[in-house]
Image (spheres, helix red, strand yellow):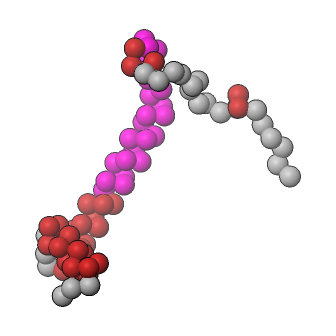
Amino acid sequence: MVPMTDNNDFRYEPVERFGASMTNPRPWNKSALAGVELLNGRVAMLGFMAAIAGELLTGKGIVGQLALMGRWLLGSS
């Protein structure tokens, strides 16, 4: 069984009252933000590539693909 560790091993920021971070002069945790932004960028690239692949497969743009999906979900032709 894995031994439990205390929360001091993690690099989480301390819990603050609601809205305190908006007025706090403490700097942002830039290393955590860099990882989040890297993930967001990669997911956006995957979504863009999926839209391009869908356009190549269906011959319709994103609005046409949404209309096709809506018709398919509603069961109409």
Q: Residue at x 76, y 32 (%)?
A: 6
Percent of width and height locating residue 35: 45, 40
Most extreme residue toward the right is 1
Using the image as rendered, state which of residue 35 and residue 18 is in the foreground. 18
Residue 63 appears left or right of 73? left
Question: What residue do we see at 26% from left, 84% from top?
Answer: 75
Q: Is residue 39 rendered magenta in the image?
A: yes
Residue at 36% over, 54% down: 43
Q: Position of residue 11 (x, y in %)?
A: 61, 30
**Above/below status of 53 relative to 42:** below
Magenta stretch: give its range.
Answer: 24-45
Residue beneath the point at 84% across and 43% down = 3
Q: Is residue 63 above or below residue 19?
A: below
Q: Nearer the viewer, residue 71 or 28?
A: 71
Q: Is residue 18 magenta?
A: no
Q: What type of secondary structure mainly makes up the magenta span?
A: helix
